[in-house]
Amino acid sequence: METVNNNGRPQTEDREKDFFPETNDYPELEEKLEYTFQNKALLLNALTHSSFASEKGKSYRFNNERLEFIGDAFLDAIVGSKIYDIAPDQHEGFLSKTRAAVVCERSLAEVAREIGLGSFIRLGHGEETGGGREKDSILADAMEAVIGAVFKDGGYEKAQRLVLMLFRDHIRLAVQGKLYKDYKTTLQEKLQNKYRNPEIEYIILDESGPDHDKSFTAQIRINGKPMGQGLGKSKKEAQQAAARQVILKGEF
């Protein structure tokens, strides 16, 4: 039977309040998520890695794994539905493969890095000193947990909006089959085979369009000489397009 304190509340409830205080220490993260939590403890829970909870002598109820479970399921559903809508002529196998590319650990970790999520995660000493803030697995799990926390705090529509905002570019590139064709790395390897220390520089020449539908033009310079340029809906996509153009020229 659950014991109670002098206020009549279960002691486990008080322990959770102590571990997840109702403070707003993460306004910067909420701004990046474009969502303000009503229950700040949910956000703190989503940011608590099992190593932190374990060092404090806490059980699984105090780490982010349960929220990760919710976020994983919700992310699958929203991404799958979006791919279904924008690829009406594709078969089930394509839909499954494309969704898998968007919700894989690497993709989740990339999105987490884009919003600086790693700096907010509560880690145990061992993970902290071992570079845990940069581990794909920890970042991916925390990203799913944050999505789960938004779903539990704000409901379906708020969580759906968050997922589509954060994963918009990844979904589009995956449907186009371009998500993980890394032309920049391929070009760098080719140049290193030709030059001892090649100087490779990417410059954003132009940025246009409204905030929700921007376009970028990137130029690549090799040893100071402009060699190609590309267009994209993000800076990263434009840089990849520029690298692809240089590769297709066949000069290297």
Image (tube, rainbow, N blue to C red):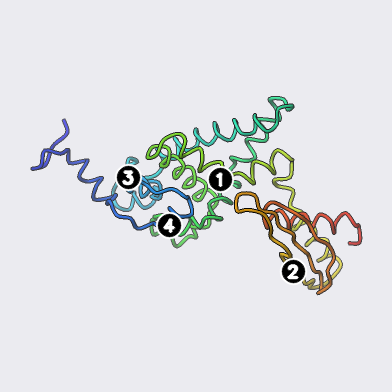
**Residue 103 image offset from top left, x and y in percent:** 58, 40
- Which quarter of the picture shows residue 220? bottom right
**Residue 20 image offset from top left, x and y in percent:** 29, 49
Sequence order check, earlier mark of 4 and 2: 4
Q: Nearer the viewer, mark 2 or mark 1?
A: 1
Q: Give the residue at mark 2.
A: 201
Q: Give the residue at mark 3.
A: 39
Amino acid type at image mark 3: Asn
Q: Identify whether 238 is placed above or below 146.
A: below
Amino acid type at image mark 2: Glu
Amino acid type at image mark 1: Met
Total residue callouts: 4
The residue lying at 43 percent from left, 60 percent from top is 128
- The tag on residue 165 is 1
Q: Nearer the viewer, residue 94 or 131?
A: 94
Residue most extreme to the front:
210
Residue most extreme to the top:
92
The residues bearing labels 1 and 4 have C-alpha atoms spaced at a distance of 20 Å
The residues bearing labels 3 and 1 have C-alpha atoms spaced at a distance of 22 Å
- Which quarter of the picture shows residue 113? bottom right
The residue lying at 71 percent from left, 53 percent from top is 237
The residue lying at 56 percent from left, 47 percent from top is 166
For the N terminus, the image quarter is top left
Q: Nearer the viewer, mark 4 or mark 3?
A: 3
- Kindly indicate whether the residue at mark 1 contacts the one at mark 3 (C-beta within 8 angstroms): no
